[in-house]
Image (cartoon, rainbow, N blue to C red):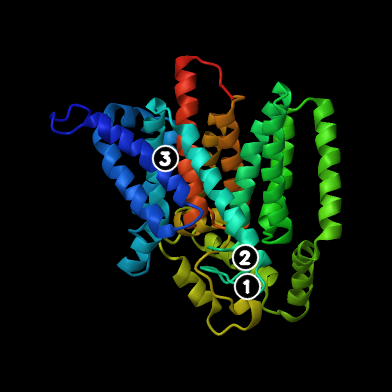
Amino acid sequence: MANWPRPIDIARLTRGADGLAVAAAISLPWSTSATVILVVLWLIALIPTLSWKDVCDELLTPAGGLPVLLVLLGVVGMLWADVSLHERWKGLDSFLKLLVIPLLFVQYRRADNAAWVFGGYVVSCLVLLLVSYVLAAWPQPVFLFSREPGVPVKNAASQSGEFVTCIFGLIYLAYDALKRRQWPWLVGLAVVMLAMLANIIFVATSRTALVLILILLVLFALKQLSRGGMLIMLASAVALIAIAWVSSPYLRYRTVQIWTDYRNYAATDERNSSGERIEFAKKSIAFIREAPLFGHGTGTIPSLFAKATAGQAGSEGSFTTNPHNQTFAVAIQLGLIGAAVLWAMWIAHLLLFRGPGLMEWIGVVLVAQNVIGSLFNSHLFDFLQGWVYVIGVGIAGGVALKRRAAGKPSAS
């Protein structure tokens, strides 16, 4: 496809595709519709510029091929799903975004604007942060496109997840600034990271984000710090946790609520968040046992939960179209074979980012966020979290592959 007739300006399309990737990243924190439109435009600009040999070569690698294999299993899973064609297509829709990953690998083996993509995303999140604080301090709450105070769009879990990705991308730059003694940069980055952390603690807390922060701190320490640095980071983390716990009633409430909800569920089968998640897990395991190898087919999750909750009360009667666990969401539909491909894909992507550079660290953050978050949610199938993973891993992975092919050390 690289040898198109002259009327098509391949160089202009290539520049357009690179710019649209930046625009899509900027739109992610704000608008689902804008992201969809920009991704479609990006594909229209990108596809004529691709060498299909390069695409096929990428598909033969684990990192590029396993996402496509998971989509193909989703297509095949439509054959034995005992639901309507509309429900099957709706179920397949959750898988399709994974097809973008190998295309981004090919694009960012040649493109030089990866830093602009991630920089645009961070700046967009900074604007979101400022709007969040304005709305949190407003005398009469104005929630814009969300029902939660201090959350302008989407929800608290999405907002805190975005800020976590920014914090742990910037922490690499802050550590590099510290090593280089670039004090103005260090102070500026520290202010931004602390402002985002404070927003998570005081304004929009997600319990998944809190778990993720602790795990990513450990990963950063293991990947970047000496033993002395680890001790300093551990002491700093303990101090921050203590200050946050004492100073934020909201954080204490959100944390203690997990145990309170569980006790009420265990005693009375009260319908609450903890009880519902336990019931979702129980039912999901039962569904997988019924069809362990190949699953019930693509798009069957709503139908299975509808049958299992019919006539039930309390948490047992909680209906969902989302089992709140990515492995369950795949295994219910595609069996243990599908779940094995999912985990193989995550491992292949994690191995892609073994180097010491910034893009490799961003890749680790995004894979870890998706894997950990997917223990409590179906993040790969969710719109925002799924596209953050696809775009982030695709671009960072393309850069990592380019450096590896050129035999260059990973730059910060």
Labels 2 & 1 near each other (Cβ < 8 A): yes
Q: Which amino acid type is shown beneath numbered disc 3?
A: Ile
Q: Residue at x 18, y 26 (%)?
A: 3
Residue identified by numbered label 2: 135
Q: Which amino acid type is shown beneath numbered disc 2?
A: Leu
- In primary-sequence order, the first of circles 2 and 1 is 2
Looking at the image, residue 281 lies above or below residue 391: below
User: Judging from the image, what secondary structure is the residue with disc 1 in?
Assistant: loop
- In primary-sequence order, the first of circles 3 and 1 is 3
Q: CA distance from mark 2 to mark 1?
A: 6 Å
Query: Left of 18 or right of it: where is 203?
Result: right
Q: Where is residue 221, by image quadrant?
A: top right
Residue identified by numbered label 1: 141
- The answer to whether residue 330 of the structure is visible from this angle is no
Q: Position of residue 23 (x, y in %)?
A: 41, 45
**Of the pair 36 and 101, the residue shown nearer to us:** 36
User: Judging from the image, what secondary structure is the residue with disc 3 in?
Assistant: helix
Q: Residue at x 57, y 42 (%)?
A: 366
Q: Where is residue 319, by image quadrant?
A: bottom right
Residue identified by numbered label 3: 101
- The answer to whether residue 306 of the structure is visible from this angle is yes
Q: Position of residue 205 (x, y in %)?
A: 69, 60
Q: Position of residue 176 (x, y in %)?
A: 67, 27
Judge the density around disc 2: few (<14), some (14-19), many (≥20) Cα neighbours within 10 Å.
many
Q: Which amino acid type is shown beneath numbered disc 1?
A: Pro
Labels 3 & 1 near each other (Cβ < 8 A): no
Looking at the image, residue 226 lies above or below residue 243: above
Q: CA distance from mark 3 to mark 2?
A: 36 Å
Q: Residue at x 23, y 36 (%)?
A: 48
Q: Residue at x 62, y 50 (%)?
A: 163
